[in-house]
Amino acid sequence: MTPTISIADLGEGQAALLKVAGVDVLLCHVEGGFYAVHGQCSHARQSLAAGRLRGFEITCPLHGARFDVRTGACLAAPAQIPIQRFPVQIENGKVCVDVTRS
Ligand code: FES
């Protein structure tokens, strides 16, 4: 697990793109939970940093594919495959992400 930002630094309903051990990670805070998925869309590798987070769904800003940030599941075309999700744990007030597992 790699420590990232403090839980206080990501408000409810917000997402942030972080570099964790060299991997682009989109960290999301939804309904009290923290979720981490790969930071690039599986369609054409667009960064999800400017994506719109609504509930548990992140929408790609380029062509509108949607993914569930809890699982990485693809919910809407044009993307066809999920994005990777990563385990998250809170330790000492920090959001920790393991990019070596999904
Ligand atoms: S790059 Fe994300 S939907 Fe096309």
Image (cartoon, rainbow, N blue to C red):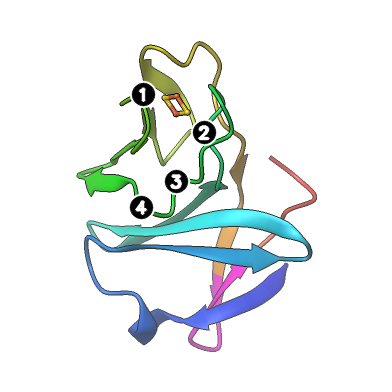
Tell me residue 79's x, y (percent): 47, 16
The residue sitting at 20% across, 44% down in the picture is 55
Local crowd at mark 4 within 10 Å, few (<14), some, or many (≥20)? some
Q: Residue at 34% x, 85% y: name it.
A: 8
Q: Is residue 95 magenta?
A: yes
Give the distance between the C-alpha atoms of the residues marked 3 and 2, in whole angstroms.
6 Å
Report the residue marked by disc 4. 50
Residue where numbered disc 3 is placed: 48
Cα distance between the residues tagged 1 and 3: 10 Å
Q: CA distance from mark 1 to mark 4?
A: 13 Å
CA gap, disc 4 and disc 2: 11 Å
Pointer 3 residue Cβ closer than 8 Å to ligand 1: yes
Mark closer to the chain start, 1 or 4: 4
The circle drawn on residue 65 is: 1
Residues under numbered marks 3 and 2 in contact, where contact means CB atoms less than 8 Å apart: yes
Quadrant containing ligand 1:
top left
Kind of residue indicated by mark 4: Ala
Q: Are circles 1 and 4 on residues that touch, CB within 8 Å?
A: no
Quadrant location, the N terminus: bottom right
The type of residue carrying mark 2 is Cys
Mark 1 or mark 3: which comes first in sequence?
3
Can you tell which mark lies on residue 100?
Answer: none
Q: Are the residues at dot 1 and dot 3 in contact (C-beta closer than 8 Å)?
A: no
Residue 63 in percent (x, y) is at 35, 24
In the picture, residue 22 is in which quadrant?
Answer: bottom right
Q: Write the start and end of the magenta stretch as one range.
A: 90-96
Front in this rendered view, residue 7 or 80: 80
Under circle 2, the secondary element is loop
Q: What amino acid does circle 1 point to?
A: Ala
Kindly tell me whether mark 2's CB lies below 8 Å from ligand 1: yes
